Structure formats: structure tokens, C-alpha cells
Image (tube, rainbow, N blue to C red):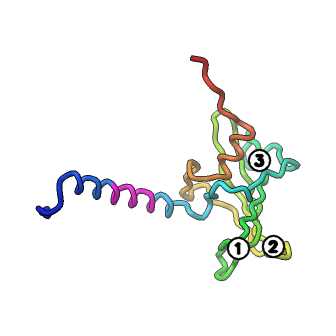
């Protein structure tokens, strides 16, 4: 049943906007805990790059993330971190990167939480600023000749 006072183009626009909002919300909820937004407070610790111990043939590197505001690092409930170190594993062929370990620290640098991501846990690398930072630094895409 449609409302005759709303034009067909307006209904299509409204339906498309609702569908996009639902898709975005479900994607964000899918793996919101491990994706990082691109941020100037995200940096690679260049002294830590080396072979991954979890995945033979892959490389690992720690990223430092200090968003300026505390971030939720629960569980446990009420855990807030000022800084996080996240361990990313990556390869250039095929080109992929994913976070595997995260250490959360308070203002004094004391570890308040340590987590390891379950590889079967949902994760969307296309929304992860940390994965993009690692891949762009170590596995840049090359322009193809025309």
C-alpha cells in the first residue's frame, strides 16, 4: 500500500536511503570491535616489522593508536583505554591485512586489557583504517600502464 501524496521518485529515494542505512548499520555492527577509523593518531611502529609467528610466509607489525579520547576496551565492563597497540598480520601477494592482537593501556601506560581476535570472528578489512595503513605502507598498489 502506497501513500498517493508521495511521488514515485520520492518513494524510490526514501527506499534507497533506508536500504543503504540498514546495510551500513549491519556492516558496522558485524565487526565494529576490530576496525579502526583512519586517523592521524594511528601510526606504524617501524621497529616491529618482521615475520609473523601466527602465519608462516606472512609479515607482522604493531600499530600504535592514541585517539585522544579514551576508547572502550571491554570486556571487562568499564574498561577504557587511552592508547592501544594492535598487531597486524599482512601479505602483499595476495594483498591482505588483519588485526590479531590488541593491548589496551590507560593514561599511565599500564596494560588494562589484552585481546586476541578469533579468526572466525566477523571482520571487514575494507572498513579498517589500520589495515589500509599497513597495506599502503608495505604493499602499495601500482598504477597500470594505459
The residue positioned farthest toward the top in the image shown: 146
Q: CA distance from mark 3 to mark 2?
A: 21 Å
Q: Secondary structure at mark 3?
A: strand
- Closer to the chain start, of discs 2 and 1, is 1
Residue at horizontal 71%, vertical 45%?
Answer: 134
Q: Secondary structure at mark 1?
A: loop
Q: Is residue 32 above or below residue 62?
A: below
Residue at horizontal 65%, vertical 50%?
Answer: 98
Magenta-drawn segment:
17-26
- Closer to the chain start, of discs 3 and 2, is 3
Q: Which residue is mark 2?
A: 111
Residue at horizontal 70%, vertical 72%?
Answer: 69
- Depth-wise, is mark 2 or mark 1 nearer the camera? 1
Residue 60 circle label = 3
Residue 82 circle label = none
Q: Nearer the viewer, residue 35 or 8?
A: 8
Q: Is residue 92 above or below residue 37?
A: above
Mark 1 Cα shell of 10 Å, populated few (<14), some (14-19), many (≥20): some
Q: CA distance from mark 2 to mark 1?
A: 14 Å
* Residue 93 placement: quadrant: top right
Position of 7 with respect to 38 (left or right) is: left
Mark 2 Cα shell of 10 Å, populated few (<14), some (14-19), many (≥20): some
Q: Which residue is mark 1?
A: 70
Amino acid at each position: 500500500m502506497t501513500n498517493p501524496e508521495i511521488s514515485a521518485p520520492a518513494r524510490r529515494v526514501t527506499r534507497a536511503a533506508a536500504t543503504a542505512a540498514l546495510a551500513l548499520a549491519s556492516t558496522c555492527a558485524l565487526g565494529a570491535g576490530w576496525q579502526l577509523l583512519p586517523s592521524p593518531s594511528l601510526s606504524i611502529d617501524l621497529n616491529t616489522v618482521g615475520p609473523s609467528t601466527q602465519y608462516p610466509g606472512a609479515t607482522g607489525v604493531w600499530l600504535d593508536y592514541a585517539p585522544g579520547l579514551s576508547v572502550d576496551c571491554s570486556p571487562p565492563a568499564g574498561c577504557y583505554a587511552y592508547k592501544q597497540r594492535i598487531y597486524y598480520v599482512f601479505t602483499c601477494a595476495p594483498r591482505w591485512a588483519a588485526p590479531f592482537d590488541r593491548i589496551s593501556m590507560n593514561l599511565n601506560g599500564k596494560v588494562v586489557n589484552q585481546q586476541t581476535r578469533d579468526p572466525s570472528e566477523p571482520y571487514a578489512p575494507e572498513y579498517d583504517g589500520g589495515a589500509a595503513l599497513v597495506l599502503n605502507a608495505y604493499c602499495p598498489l601500482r598504477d597500470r600502464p594505459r
